[in-house]
Image: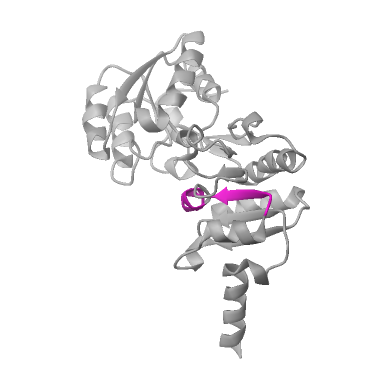
Amino acid sequence: MRRFILIILALATLFPSLAQAYDILVLQSRRDPAYEDVLTGFRSVHSDSLRVIVLSDYVEVDTVRIVREDRPRVILGIGEAALTAARKVRNIPVVALMSLGITNQRASHPNLTGITMFAPPERYISIFRNMKTRRVGVIYNPAKSGWYLRLARQAAEEAGIALVLREVFTPRETIERLAELTGKVDALWMLPDSTAVTRGTTEAYFRFGQEQNVPVASFAANYLGLGASAILEIDRLAMGRQADTMVTDILKGKRIENIPLGFPKGIRLKINPSVLKHLNIAIH
């Protein structure tokens, strides 16, 4: 009996004809606490009907077929795999979250919008100004975060801060580019760039900070334990609530091309007091 029930549930998920009508198709990449937080935030303020498909639960999900037969009005994609699956759909709006690839997809997918994984650059520049730093090193891949650096450079110039940029096109170049910054910067800025920052290169940033005696600003709380001086962390519940505004506008008839990609509004500053004390830096 248990096996029979599981088969029926699987069929109801994969074959839309067995599912109830709904307005929002939620594609969630996998069962991950971060993604669950985003969805919880969204559900806390959104009352329209929705259907959730966790992609990792299935070998393959035919998103195009589901959309054709279910006819949802909006897709909400959470995570990189969800964005990849939603990208195949061109006839309804897609709001993407928790994905680094979203910023490079808008031009070729006019039905796509969402919220980036980057904090507004002004927030980081404010941290560097507070630290009284003047030369900030940044390693980045132009194809993935070049758009962000263009905004950041403008904000930095207005604050009297010079960004010392080094480009990388493969992760293995990161350590060489970091070495080029030796003696040339008084702070280091880690971006959520999947080429510049990987499992294999993360420690090199903090090793550089220790050897050069400079602060490292980053984007994830777990980096505080590795030696980051300060991080700007995205409030995932707030991101879900922010996504509700976008989805609601679409359901009310607003054209998706008039809903620009947004920066996350819920951003929390966290600091590492021991590292800042060692560097004799105070953040107010």
Q: Is residue 216 visible?
A: no
Q: Which range of residues does the magenta coloring cover? A: 72-85
Q: Quadrant of the N terminus?
A: bottom right
Residue 261 placement (x, y as % from top left) = 58, 32
Give the answer, above or below, for where 16 lies relative to 279: below
Residue 39 placement (x, y as % from top left) = 64, 53
- Pick the residue in front: 137 or 168: 168
Q: Name the side, left or right, on which 284 lies relative to 19.
A: left
Q: Name the side, left or right, on which 251 lies relative to 121.
A: right
Which picture quadrant has residue 19?
bottom right
Which picture quadrant has residue 135?
top left
Give the answer, above or below, for where 281 lies relative to 256: above
Residue 208 placement (x, y as % from top left) = 29, 31
Residue occupying image coordinates x 55% and y 27%:
120
Residue occupying image coordinates x 64% and y 35%:
256
- Pick the residue in front: 1 or 223: 1
Q: Is residue 47 visible?
A: yes
Q: Name the side, left or right, on which 276 lies relative to 63.
A: left
Give the answer, above or below, for where 245 lies relative to 280: below
Give the answer, above or below, for where 9 lies relative to 137: below
- Pick the residue in front: 280 or 43: 43
Residue occupying image coordinates x 56% and y 53%:
35
Q: Quadrant of the C terminus?
A: top right
